[in-house]
Image: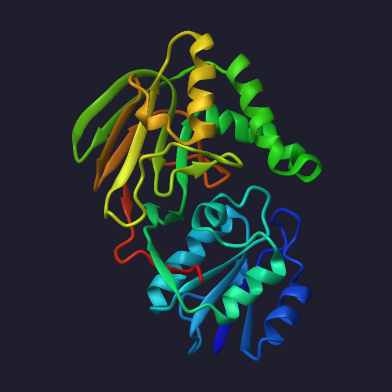
Amino acid sequence: MHLAVVTNQRSGRGTERDRILRLLSHRGVEISPFDVADLPVDLPDVDRLVIAGGDGSLGNAARTANANGVPLAVLPTGTANDFANAAGIPKDLEAACRLAATGTRTLHHEVGLHGDLAFVNVAAAGLSAVASRIAKPHKKRLGALAYPLAAVRAGITAPPIDCRVLVDGAEVFAGKAWQVVVAVTGAFGGGSAIGGTRRDDGLLDVAAVPAGSRVALAKYGYGMRRGHLTSLRDVHHHRGNRIAVETTSEFNVDGELRELDPGDFTLLSGGVDVVVR
């Protein structure tokens, strides 16, 4: 087994690079190490790509695995690790390294795109982006707890956004919204999820939460923490091949704040196979 192992020293609690390489090498595998900033488009002749990092590191790694026709193994060393949690990947680093080196079962996952930006969980505008900005300086101290605490503060202080949402060219929402989420797994915010997504149905999901009373935000927040936001009656939930969100708001894309140019969200053809057992 030959592994391309990608680490990201900026992510979460750090990738513990030396420990990761040691744990993997003890499994008798050949290793080609890379830093996430220097990951080449064309990998050497490897059997799978192993990515150690947070959710923000996974999109590009998934696209590279797709381009090279190899599975992706995830070592969850970020703060929230929403993708790994949704996929059932062990939180313990030693167990995750064992899975990466010896696992034989994969599950197919979709990968979202916006231009050259790849993502595996969500791209969200509105309160999620505000909460991400609030949480950022507290993540090292509070870990994943920083996200729900920041979400409460965002819900108290942040205004709704103006937006227009189109699915396959047809308008499905226009007006003020607390939040708009374009979803692949739909997991975000250290344990929240929109619910109702399918990892391999060939379609993107979008959920728009219309603006209204701040009192109602408690209902939406509970829905996200329970993973059933899309089942709430007044939430606009749609699926499609192409989703456009017209807004001046910044986006929280897998935990990273981004200013996105106008354009459609789509899916990466072929997705990625993720090692899960």
Location of residue 147 by image quarter: top right
In the rendered image, which quarter contains the N terminus?
Answer: bottom right
Left-right relation of 55 to 239: right
> Residue 275 in the image: x percent, y percent?
49, 71
Residue beneath the point at 28% across and 24% down: 173
Q: Where 145 sits versus 26, above or below? A: above
Left-right relation of 31 to 166: right
> Residue 65 in the image: x percent, y percent?
45, 72
Q: Where 56 sits versus 173, above or below? A: below
Q: Which is nearer the eye, 153 or 235?
A: 235
Q: Which is nearer the eye, 231 or 188?
A: 231
Location of residue 21 by image quarter: bottom right
> Is residue 137 in sight in this rendering?
yes
Residue beneath the point at 24% across and 27% down: 172
Q: Where 144 sits versus 268, above or below? A: above
Left-right relation of 268 to 11: left
